[in-house]
Image (spheres, rainbow, N blue to C red):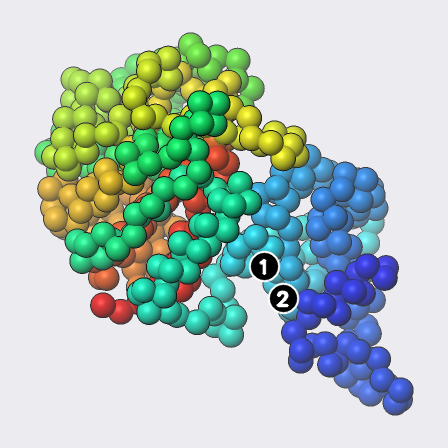
Amino acid sequence: MSLRLVLLLFCCLPLSALAQAMPTPHAETAPDRQAIALRTDPARQALDAWLVAFNSNERKQLEAFRDRYQPTMDVDGMLDFHRMTGGFRLLRHELAASGSAQMLVQELDSDTVARVKATWRAGQPLVLDIDRIERPADLRIPRLDQAAALDALAARADAMAKQDAFAGVLLVARGGKVLLQRAWGLADREAGKPATLDTKFRLGSMNKMFTAVATLQLVQAGKLSLDGSVGQYLPDYPNADIAKVTIRQLLTHTGGTGDIFGPEFDKHRLSLKTHDDYVRLYGARGPDHPPGKGFSYSNYGFVLLGDIIEHVSGQSYYDYVNQHVFAPAGMRNSGSLPEEVDVPGRAQAYTRKDGDTAWTNAADTLPYRGTAAGGGYSTAGDLLKFAQALQSGKLLSPALLAEATRKQTLVCGYGFNVADEQGVPVYGHGGGAPGMNGELRIFPTLDEVVVALANVDPQSATRLVEYYQLRMPLSK
């Protein structure tokens, strides 16, 4: 075990574990021998070595770990993961089955907690699993009153903006009253234009909420059925297996319909102008898994919903959403106009590439225009109006909204992410891609709405929302 690892464990173990781990001048007891055995277990050693290599953020250390333990490890992917998380602080090791070791860690740049598990079999590559988890009860952050929680959120955003880690807008409303709305940083770095409350930020996958509402409106009108199939609404669909996928499965990411991003998208990025264009490019593909037999987040599934909305409604997806979602909600600053159109107030998108510390314009990564899967734009104020329109029944019946925001899978309803915060329900959606990150979270029993939008890489906006969510009061 290296000195660096010993220091890491010494600094990061909880006091109770630290007391057991420190050497004493007395004879070894049974617990001492057990602790030493745990630390010399091959899986534990491999797991500890991974944490050191990962936190180093150095290619050579990660390559050395790969060569010793995990020949298939994606070093570039690990470096990207480090850029997203900032590295991990060890919270504690946990008991694990024979041949395995696991630990709880927390992101150095946020409150996010993850469980990392290593499974070791002689003569086989190490298997490493990293799963984000809810903070255990003994590690919960104390709740604050409303004013203190808002002050803490604003201070956190101030600190991130000072470090050039956040540029965007935050909005918190409760009981119909806006409690916090502020902007930080620059919407256009080349022109020196600051972000304002009226800045239109790209939404990424947050746009899926609008698609879900549009789809469910057509279900409510009897023009679609949740159990109707892709082939029923797109009769000429080229793949017979995907044609059997239902609307319900598309909304819950259980259809196995796959993604749209990758080399093919990069090659055709600017020629993919309509939902039909995407279907022509990807329609011959078969499912990633048998429809209905698993969950896998699918951007293409929502592109298909967009195409179905167009065929059933007789309108373009964009016209339908403008008329039936944005207009009833009073959302006058939202849309999906192509990138080549000069949209007043639309922020520029900025990303950091290959470990660079400087932000660069992400225009060369953006699609021609947003789709039913994501990529439109909105303001924090418009997203508050969307949340209020949902809750008031302007967009969907209360019964259908309740169904859409109930867990249909482990993490999602019908186009909405669904969770709870210590028993308090919360739903909404996030979005993230190079140069954009956003979150809308609605706490229906608290009548509270939280919005964060940024024109820089994930997880800047998401971290701020989660920081607040862990500290906000959970009673009216």
Instruction: Report the residue that reaches farthest toward the bottom.
Output: 26
Circle number at residue 60: none
Residue, x 57% and y 52% (percent of image)?
109
Q: Is residue 83 visible?
A: yes
154 and 99: which is toward the camera = 154
Q: Is residue 60 left or right of residue 132?
A: right
Q: Is residue 81 left or right of residue 439?
A: right
Q: Is residue 177 above or below residue 376?
A: below
Q: Is residue 337 above or below residue 417?
A: above
Q: Is residue 378 left or right of residue 102?
A: left
Residue, x 70% and y 62% (percent of image)?
101
Circle number at residue 106: 1
Name which quarter of the figure residue 38 lies in. Answer: bottom right
Provide residue 57's location: percent of width, then percent of height: 72, 44
Provide residue 290's location: percent of width, then percent of height: 44, 36
Circle number at residue 91: 2
Distance between mark 1 and mark 2 Cα atoms? 7 Å
Provide residue 216's location: percent of width, then percent of height: 20, 37
- Badge 1 element: strand
Given contact means CB atoms under 8 Å apart, are the residues at marks 1 and 2 in contact?
Answer: yes
Identify which amino acid the numbered label 2 is placed on: Leu
Name which quarter of the figure residue 175 lies in. Answer: bottom left
Residue, x 36% and y 66% (percent of image)?
148
- Rendered-image quadrant of the C terminus: bottom left
Identify which amino acid the numbered label 1 is placed on: Gln
N-term-proximal mark, 1 vs 2: 2
* Mark 2 surroundings within 10 Å by alpha-carbon count, few (fewer than 14), some (14 through 19), many (20 or more): some
Provide residue 79's location: percent of width, then percent of height: 67, 39
- Badge 2 element: strand
